[in-house]
Image (tube, helix red, strand yellow):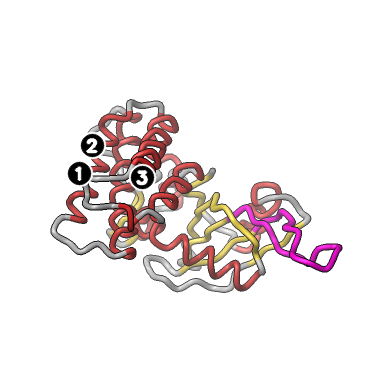
Amino acid sequence: MPRDINASIRKLEGMQDRVANAQMYTSAASKALGDLIAGMANQMKVKPGPIAKAFNAELAKQLRGKVVTQKHYQDALSKASAAGWAVATGKKAGLRTQQTLELTESTPDELAQGQRLWPSVTYQGKDVLKWYIRLLSKIEARLAEDLGLHDSQECYLGYSPSKDLFVVGFDAWFSYPSVHGMGSEPEAGWAYAPVKPMSSTIYDGEGTSGDGMFYDSGYKEAHRAFRDLVDLRLD
């Protein structure tokens, strides 16, 4: 999912305490939701109405009758965002349903269509997008801890059939001591992390600064490390 849409989702995730129920938002949360829906519509060049309807219906379904905790709200937002995005991409294709790519049962030629079919991608029948959205913050935290990242922005998802791993790529900003000995001066670079499919297992990541952002050099490094890497989501 494009970075501006992911940013809107994360902004909404921080507003759980401002939500009275599935249909009542403060003005700040309403604006954040509007930005999210508009971002999906603008990305796919479709009208926002059907996207908003799908999003709100799924969010109401997930929150109905529940005491809403932060974790439950984030999970509900992920599912609602996936529902809205599916409508956005389906509307652009002019189809009621999209062809789905099952990663574990596809030939190499079929896997090569991954970017075109995203986000209608499954792994052993499970929706990859929903899993991906839920796990992103954990991947970012792991890379920040392992590589000393000041900040990062997800921009890539790929799948290696031979390793049976997803690879998540980021534009990254690394923290280094400043020339004055205080604080830090983030330096731009890239990072990626291999992830076990449909789990929360995140393996040691790779990354560096001073060699451009992810698509400047990190993309090539990821494909060098995973020779059969299939591109699913490019931002």
Q: Residue at x 15, y 55 (%)?
A: 64
Quarter holding the N terminus is top left
Q: Amino acid at mark 1?
A: Ala
Mark earlier in primary sequence (1, 3): 3
Give the image quarter of residue 127: bottom left
In the image, is 31 to the left or to the right of 216?
left
Query: Label 3: which residue?
Result: 29
Query: Label 2: which residue?
Result: 53
Is residue 177 one of those drawn in magenta?
Answer: yes
Q: Secondary structure at mark 3?
A: helix
Give the image quarter of residue 35: top left
Q: Amino acid at mark 2?
A: Lys
Q: How many labels sit on residues?
A: 3
Expressed as whole percent of the image width and height from the top left, the position of residue 51 reads 29, 35
Q: Tell me which segment is drawn in magenta.
A: 170-190
- Give the spatial CA distance, label 1 vs label 2: 6 Å
Evaluate if marks 1 and 3 touch, with contact meaning CB atoms under 8 Å apart. no
Q: Residue at x 44, y 69 (%)?
A: 196
Query: What mark, if any, has residue 57 been given in the picture?
Result: 1
Expressed as whole percent of the image width and height from the top left, the position of residue 44 reads 41, 31
Evaluate if marks 1 and 2 touch, with contact meaning CB atoms under 8 Å apart. yes
Task: Please tell me whether residue 169 is drawn above or below residue 71 in the rendered image.
Answer: above
